[in-house]
Amino acid sequence: MSELAKMKCEACQADAPTVTDAELRELIRAIPDWSVQVRDGIMQLERVYKFKNFKQAMAFTNKLAVLAEQEFHHPGILTEWGKVTVCWWSHSIKGLHRNDFIMAAKTDLLFD
């Protein structure tokens, strides 16, 4: 288990700083299957998980929903036949916070 996956999310206020470029380079190495995407000027972490069918994709989505509620940090989730696309970013700061990397690592554990 990665060190990030062992951490807990912290409350993120609207004035919290986004990760720096140096922090981004360091943190992304811990979650190599994730990519950084920019949508509407907002940096997000994205990963597509593949499944054999819709039922497995939906079961993963439901496990992710439980995790998100436990951590009180919620992703964008697109569930389709055979795949789930997950996007993490911090809505309150309109960008990436350490919490997003923690949740990406925790999401990976649900897939294993």
Image: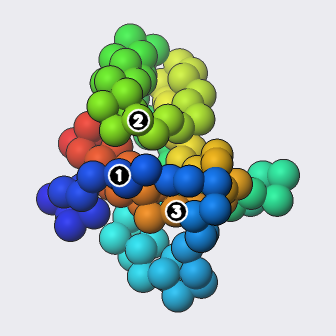
In the picture, the quarter occupied by the C terminus is top left
Horizontal relation, residue 6 to residue 68: left or right: left
Q: CA distance from mark 3 to mark 1?
A: 10 Å
Q: CA distance from mark 3 to mark 2?
A: 14 Å
Residue visible at 34% across and 70% down in the picture:
30
Amino acid type, label 2: Phe
Amino acid type, label 3: His
Q: Residue furthest top?
A: 55
Looking at the image, is mark 1 or mark 2 earlier in the sequence?
A: 1
The residue pinned by badge 2 equals 72
The residue pinned by badge 1 equals 9
Residue 51 percent across, percent down from the top left: 39, 29
Residue visible at 55% across and 31% down in the picture:
77
Q: Cβ–Cβ below 8 Å for labels 1 and 2?
A: yes
Q: Quadrant of residue 96?
A: bottom right
Horizontal relation, residue 23 to residue 91: left or right: left
Residue visible at 26% across and 37% down in the picture:
110
Residue 66 vertical position relative to residue 20 in the rendered view, above or below:
above
Tell me the SS state at disc 3.
loop
Tell me the SS state at disc 1.
loop
Looking at the image, is mark 3 or mark 1 earlier in the sequence?
A: 1
Looking at the image, is mark 3 or mark 2 earlier in the sequence?
A: 2
